[in-house]
Image: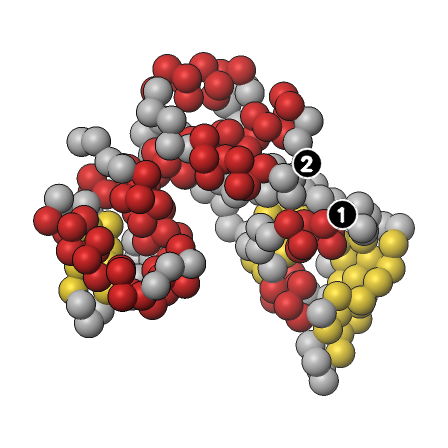
């Protein structure tokens, strides 16, 4: 089934908002995710429902059908492989790749994606630590936690981020903090939930709760 750029963007947004299709994404959430007028969402959701790509109810929201899941996973796979390619092969920085990959993800060439995957060595995660679906749409299994939920004095490895904005990524760069960096919480401030952290065993600083909640770590 051929899908348009707009349809693919909707399906990808629903996938992200539904936590892997476990809970329905409502119209307002989808509008916010895509930065569009909420009034225009209902018509597209009805269209996707008629095509069998989602199950949609006006009050509860949208869930992907099996076919919708396949389209969303394929689009996400292309996006994250392109991000990886741009960083590894073309020397883009991790704060530069998202917008470019947003355009490239809609190229419809399975051979191109297969060859790129092979060239990159079949990566499991993109430069932001996000898992890359395989050719069957399956995501690698991993169970990170937010740094804001991590234990004090334990050493963790930064394995992902939930805020992909250029401003946030550039903020992390000022601390030489990236995927694979070590993070250790050395103190906690109950008043504002900020945390004292030791980065890469060398740099001590204080991160706000917002920063900590956007960093995904594993031991």
Front one among 183 and 173 = 173
Q: Position of residue 208 (x, y in %)?
A: 71, 69
Q: Are marks 1 and 2 in contact (CB under 8 Å)?
A: yes
Residue 69 sits in quarter = top left
Q: Position of residue 59 (x, y in %)?
A: 19, 72
**Residue visible at 49% across and 30% down in the picture:** 81
Instruction: Tell me the colour scheme of the image.
Output: secondary structure
Q: Which residue is mark 1?
A: 173
Numbered label attached to residue 119? none
Whether 182 is drawn above or below 210: the answer is above
Tell me if mark 1 has few (under 14), some (14-19) or many (20+) residues whose alpha carbon lies within 10 angstroms of its own. few
Residue 183 sits in quarter = bottom right
Residue 218 visible? no
Q: Which residue is mark 2?
A: 93
Q: Is residue 3 left or right of residue 51?
A: right
Whether 135 is drawn above or below 25: the answer is above
Q: Is residue 26 left or right of residue 206?
A: left
């Amino acid at each position: 089934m051929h899908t348009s750029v707009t349809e693919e963007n909707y399906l990808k947004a629903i996938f992200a908002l539904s936590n892997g299709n476990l809970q329905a994404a409502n119209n307002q959430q989808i509008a916010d995710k895509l930065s569009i007028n909420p009034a225009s969402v209902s018509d597209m959701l009805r269209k996707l429902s008629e095509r069998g790509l989602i199950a949609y109810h006006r009050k509860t929201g949208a869930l992907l059908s099996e076919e919708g899941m396949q389209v969303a996973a394929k689009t996400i796979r292309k996006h994250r492989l392109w991000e990886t390619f741009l960083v590894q092969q073309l020397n883009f920085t991790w704060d530069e790749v998202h917008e470019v990959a947003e355009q490239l993800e809609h190229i419809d060439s399975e051979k191109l994606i297969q060859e790129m995957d092979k060239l990159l060595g079949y990566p499991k995660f993109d430069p932001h630590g996000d898992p890359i679906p395989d050719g069957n749409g399956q995501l690698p299994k991993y169970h990170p936690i937010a740094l804001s939920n991590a234990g004090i004095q334990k050493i963790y490895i930064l394995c992902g981020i939930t805020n992909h904005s250029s401003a946030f990524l550039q903020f992390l760069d000022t601390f030489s903090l990236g995927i694979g960096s070590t993070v250790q919480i050395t103190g906690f401030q109950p008043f504002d939930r900020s945390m004292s952290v030791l980065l890469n065993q060398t740099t001590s600083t204080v991160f706000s709760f917002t920063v900590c909640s956007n960093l995904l770590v594993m031991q």
